[in-house]
Image: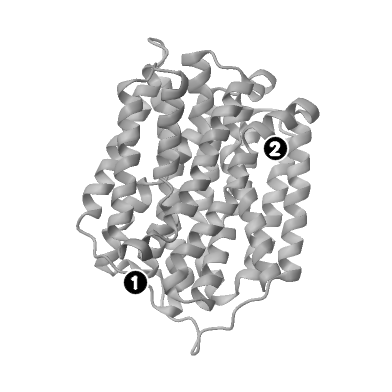
């Protein structure tokens, strides 16, 4: 089982890579294919939306079929999407490829969480969830400066062909080495509707939806255009900033994991961390042209303090009955990833609508939108019930 879980974590490294690499590839795709920031925002949004739409069927498949076939088959499809991206001749083909990659990545983290929820004590779920995302965030790092260096040697198409090959190999390894946990006694009865009837979850869902999207949007898409337009940064500089933010997100995921046991609360760890992320967004909103270390630190702060995804997942997991764990974790993920996908497209249109004036104007609008929705999520979350299993 340990080898199988390691394969799932490797698949999650790929998932983190795929959701963030467009920020670094944007200059090359603009030159070679004429892809605009709006095109790339849509392509990124398609990844998140297809990923999110798949969460309901993936949840049912985890409970009924098991994680082995669910993850291996779909990841293989994602490898096909990476191959299509490598052959893309237009922005439309990039969008289709990103949608397929999103489908392929959709089960890997939830399959891992499903196994943790079934085999390990609920007390350590948050820590294990954070460790997986922390390790998986190496993919986030890989899609920054290392990807820039790979593109200089192999080009963006050669880099995508290599990723497609790795994706296929990991899919095969999951099919070979992963073992499904035993089925819950009596079978998996019930549906996601049973979870939606639980009032406690509805006070967690909004923050689950809004906590990840500022970090995902900045790291996965807008850091590149922002530094290009406002600071005239080259690809190397963009790679350095995205690398720093990637490391901040890794550190945040590892740091959040044990904090519920340190402080004896999940709710207030989550609320405090996201409040600090909100302050960083407000800093970017107030000083969009600061540049240098100040802007880099604020962007890294969004990644560091906004890395509460596994802790919020653990908070929701505390309310799930055993026979609905698969549906539960994927329902939470639906809110987190689905909102991010929608907002990738919204911010793309917002960027287009606010361009034409000062170089920083579109990014001020984006920072303001991120800050507003995160504040709304925090306000609703104040009324949630704290639970530590």
Rendered location of residue 84, percent (x, y)? 72, 40
Label 1: how many Cα within 10 Å (few below 14, some 14–19, many 20+): some
Q: Earlier in the sequence, mark 1 or mark 2?
A: 2
Q: Position of residue 28 (x, y in %)?
A: 67, 23
Quadrant of residue 286 within the rendered picture: top left
Give the color scheme: rainbow, by chain, secondary structure or one colour.
one colour
- Looking at the image, residue 5 lies above or below residue 239: below
Secondary structure, mark 2, is helix
Image coordinates for residue 353, horizontal then vertical, percent: 38, 20
Asked whether residue 125 is in view, the answer is yes
Please rate how many residues cluster around mark 2, counting C-alpha atoms within 10 Å: few if below 14, some from 14 to 19, many from 20.
many
> On the image, which quarter does residue 242 sit in?
top right
Numbered disc 1: secondary structure: loop
Task: Name the residue located 76 percent from the left edge and 32 percent from the top edge.
Answer: 157
Q: Which residue is mark 1?
A: 319
The mark found on residue 85 in the picture is 2
């Amino acid at each position: 089982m340990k080898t199988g879980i390691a394969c799932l974590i490797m698949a999650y490294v790929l998932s983190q890579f795929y959701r963030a690499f467009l920020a670094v590839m944007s200059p090359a795709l603009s030159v070679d294919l004429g892809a605009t920031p709006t095109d790339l925002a849509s392509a990124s949004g398609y990844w998140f939306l297809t990923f999110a739409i798949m969460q309901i069927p993936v949840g049912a498949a985890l409970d009924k079929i098991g994680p082995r076939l669910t993850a291996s088959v779909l990841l293989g499809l994602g490898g096909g999407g990476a191959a299509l991206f490598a052959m893309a001749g237009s922005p439309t083909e990039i969008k289709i490829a990103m949608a397929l990659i999103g489908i392929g990545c959709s089960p890997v983290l939830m399959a891992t969480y499903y196994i943790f929820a079934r085999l390990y004590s609920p007390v350590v779920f948050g820590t294990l969830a954070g460790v997986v995302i922390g390790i998986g965030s190496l993919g986030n790092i890989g899609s920054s400066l290392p990807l820039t260096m790979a593109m200089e040697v192999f080009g963006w198409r050669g880099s995508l062909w290599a990723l497609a090959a790795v994706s296929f190999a990991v899919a095969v390894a999951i099919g070979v080495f992963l073992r499904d946990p035993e089925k819950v006694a009596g079978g998996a009865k019930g549906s996601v509707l049973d979870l939606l009837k639980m009032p406690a979850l509805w006070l967690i869902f909004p923050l689950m939806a809004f906590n990840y999207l500022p970090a995902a949007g900045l790291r996965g898409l807008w850091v590149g255009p922002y530094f290009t337009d406002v600071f005239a940064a080259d690809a190397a500089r963009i790679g350095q900033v995205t690398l720093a933010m990637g490391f901040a997100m890794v550190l945040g995921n590892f740091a959040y994991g044990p904090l519920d046991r340190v402080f004896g609360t999940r709710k207030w760890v989550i609320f405090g961390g996201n409040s600090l992320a909100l302050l960083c967004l407000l800093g970017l909103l107030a000083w969009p042209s600061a540049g240098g270390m100040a802007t880099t630190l604020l962007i890294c702060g969004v990644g560091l303090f906004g890395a509460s995804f596994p802790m919020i997942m653990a908070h929701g997991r505390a309310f799930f009955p055993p026979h609905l764990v698969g549906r539960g974790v994927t329902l939470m993920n639906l809110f987190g990833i689905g909102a991010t996908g929608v907002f990738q497209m919204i911010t793309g249109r917002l960027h287009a609508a606010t361009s034409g004036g000062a170089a920083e104007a579109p990014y001020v609008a984006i920072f303001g939108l991120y800050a507003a929705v995160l504040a709304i999520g925090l306000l609703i979350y104040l009324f949630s019930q704290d639970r530590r299993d």
